[in-house]
Image: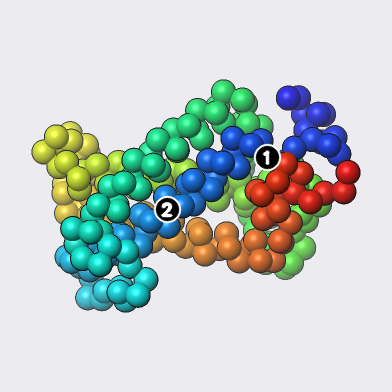
Amino acid sequence: MNRDAMHRPNASIHPIWMRITHWLNAFAVLILVTSGWQIYNASPLFPFSFPSSITLGGWLAGALQWHFAAMWLLAANGLVYLALNVASGRLFRKFFPLSPAGIWRDALAALKGKLSHADPHRYNSVQRFAYLFVMLDIALLVLSGLVLWKSVQFAFLRELLGGYEFARRIHFFAMAALVAFVAVHLVMVALVPRTLLTMLSAHGGEKQ
């Protein structure tokens, strides 16, 4: 699909494969985070724990089962998402060009409430940066998770990440960054509800 076709009134804002992989990723992340909090509680890194009401698994073994199941879903679905983004040209069309100046300009506009959302087909610089960041963050979560799961088998990766204990910290802070992204993402969806509609239907409720 060329760029002109994308901006025709009847053009789909998000292709169906993108919407499916988005919701599968969201489901996997929900399971991973809540089960991960239960795993954290079994061996905390810091002097706090997560309330049991927001954790999944009930105990360490149960949480690990949920975590491993969601891990495979996130990894497989993430690879499909990335491969289709690259193959379709969507990755470069949607997320580039990107510059520090553009991010700063759009961030200031957002803080002043002046960032336009007039064109649902186009991401602003803040969105581009945020989505690229979360892709890299999830990749870091998967890599550090492999070290925690099979430390002996992934010895080279373990050393690359600074050892097992440092990999635990990387995994924790990458998880915290992902939760922060989701929180901000939900706030933005609440402020601009049309963005949710675009992820639910081909045209996001646009007038035809």
The image quarter in which residue 38 lies:
bottom left
Q: Secondary structure at mark 1?
A: loop
Q: Residues within 10 Å of mark 2 (few under 14, many from 20)?
A: many
Which mark, by number, is residue 29? 2
Q: Residue at x 28, y 47 (%)?
A: 68
The image quarter in which residue 139 lies:
top left
Q: Secondary structure at mark 2?
A: helix
Residue furthest out toward the right: 208
Amino acid at pointer 1: His
Is 96 placed left or right of 164 in the picture? right
Tell me whether the residue at label 1 lies in contact with that at label 2, contact meaning CB atoms closer than 8 angstroms: no
Q: Residue at x 65, y 48 (%)?
A: 199
Is 207 placed left or right of 163 in the picture? right
- In x, y percent, where is residue 106? 69, 55
- In x, y percent, where is residue 196? 67, 55
- In x, y percent, where is residue 22? 54, 45
Query: Which of marks 2 and 1 precedes in the sequence?
Result: 1
Q: Circle 1 is placed at which residue position?
A: 14
Q: Quadrant of the C terminus?
A: top right
Whether residue 112 is visible, yes or no, is: yes
Q: CA distance from mark 1 to mark 2?
A: 21 Å
- In x, y percent, where is residue 35? 31, 60
Whether residue 103 is visible, yes or no, is: no
Residue furthest out toward the left: 152
Q: Is residue 167 above or below residue 82?
A: below
Q: Is residue 153 above or below residue 62?
A: above
Q: Residues within 10 Å of mark 1 (few under 14, many from 20)?
A: some
Which mark, by number, is residue 86? none
- Name the foreground residue: 104 vs 7: 7
Q: How many marks?
A: 2
- Name the foreground residue: 130 vs 18: 18
Q: Residue at x 30, y 41 (%)?
A: 143
